[in-house]
Image: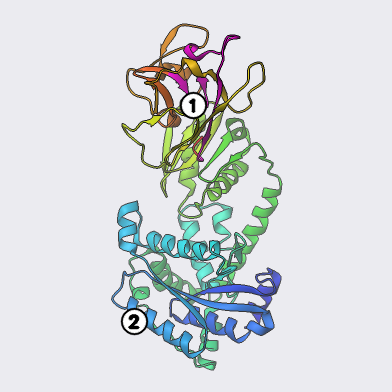
Amino acid sequence: MQKAFDAIKKYEMFKPGCVVGVAVSGGSDSMALLHFLNENKDKLDIEIIAIHVNHTTRVNDDRDQAFVEDYCKEHRIRFHKFKIEATRIARNRGLTMEEACREGRYGIFEGLRDRGIVDVVAIAHHQSDQAETILLHILRGSGLSGASGMNFVRDGFYVRPFLDTKKSEIMAYVYENDIPYVEDETNQMNLFSRNILRNKVLPELRLVWPNVDESLANFGLTCREDDGYIRKMMNFTGILRKERLVKIPLTYFVYDRSLVSRMLYDCLGDIGVHNDIEHKHIDLVINLVKNADTGARLDLPHEVTVYKEYEYLTIARKKPKLVVNTQWEFKRGVTKIEDFGKIRVKKGKLNEPVLGGLLIDGDKVPSTAVWRMRKEGDVITKFGGGTKKLKAYLIDKKVPARMRDYTPVLADGSDILLVAGVDISEKLRVTQDTKHPLIVEYTTQNWE
């Protein structure tokens, strides 16, 4: 298993003393990885935790869980087991079963990281898995990034020590060390595209090109090197990045497609989308920018929506459900708009600049005024005079279409006195006679 040691050293997978969570299904590859890391934990200066996720999709799922648990007890390996309802996840989120299993599994891994239980998670992908991945991405129309295949280290958290190791070498290690394992019967079922490649396409290719796995893996390495060089040419410092969205200046789409496509892949990765984005999706986004009107939108996999706005292209994960017919009292202090942001009302001063807030005359706020979302028929008296329908007013203020129904307003009936984070009505204007000036601040929860 020298290649595994070489990969661990070359890609600096483990820091001294780190806790390594090993993803263990019970199959030959993951059991080999668990055995290899446990046997060499002192040499590598690491601690080992086995992690098993029961997806509850197969008759033998409980058997596999018990098998891994018994092995860990026998070998005194710390063990964490989890169950997810992959079928329910797939149904509720409109995912394939494969996607649901992956999202549930990786969510558990990242939860263990966030709780400080593991520092990295080791996954048993090997050279043939890499060949399958590269071929699958090519067939799906991926560019250099997809053709690069899996990384030895992703996000500084997922590591793949066996990625340069042949399947035959892993099986030889299993037999030499008498490592028990269980067979996943679904691996032989050609229900998924990956299984078709594994069970039908690649075996035929190996009959003609025995080294096809290594050749594809080397091709992926070349693609990764070329892709890395191109990325050095990229300088997109004007992109605004949040937890659930990114905003890309429309001016960036004048660059060559090779740069634009990488920029889009990276931005999708920033909001947690690393899979199932293909060449056709990138084409759709570029076409949206070049040919669609402001306000146009496009839906992508993983509940991602792309919006063409005034100066930006915004890529966002699905919003929380809109709070309908809910209102909040106008008061000093903090008012939380569930899932969307917070409104803070505090004492202000006349003749002093207000940064990040709106200054109003507190005495002019009617006792009947409440915070709510906009409704049909709302009107506002513009600052300086003249009334306007709120929808037209928000368009004039260049509030993106995706935000117009999600921006709180201070309303007295259908009379809008303030649009949070945007502007105030003439009716709340501060004058030299104002005795109780207030500052209204609105901070969004990654939806601006």
Q: Nearer the viewer, residue 55 or 431?
A: 431
The region drawn magenta spans 417-446
Q: Earlier in the sequence, mark 1 or mark 2?
A: 2
Quadrant where the image shows the N terminus? bottom right
Q: Position of residue 255 (x, y in %)?
A: 63, 36
In front: mark 1 or mark 2?
1
Type of the residue with mark 2: Arg
Q: Position of residue 60 (x, y in %)?
A: 31, 78
Q: CA distance from mark 1 to mark 2?
A: 55 Å
**Residue at the (45%, 6%) spot, across then down:** 386
Q: Does the magenta-highlighted stretch encompass residue 439?
A: yes
Taking the spot 49% from the left edge, 11% from the top edge, the residue there is 426
Against 281, residue 13 (above or below) is: below
Going by the numbered disc 1, the residue's amino acid type is Ala
Q: Which residue has dot 1 on it? A: 420
Q: Would you say residue 128 is visible in this rendering?
A: yes
Q: Counting other residues with Cα less than 10 Å from the Cα at mark 1, is it few (<14), some (14-19), or many (20 or more)? A: many
- 276 up-or-down from 365: above or below: below
* Mark number, residue 63: 2
Which mark, residue 311? none
The residue sitting at 46% across, 25% down in the picture is 293
User: On the image, which quarter does residue 257 sit in?
Assistant: top right
What colouring does the structure picture have? rainbow
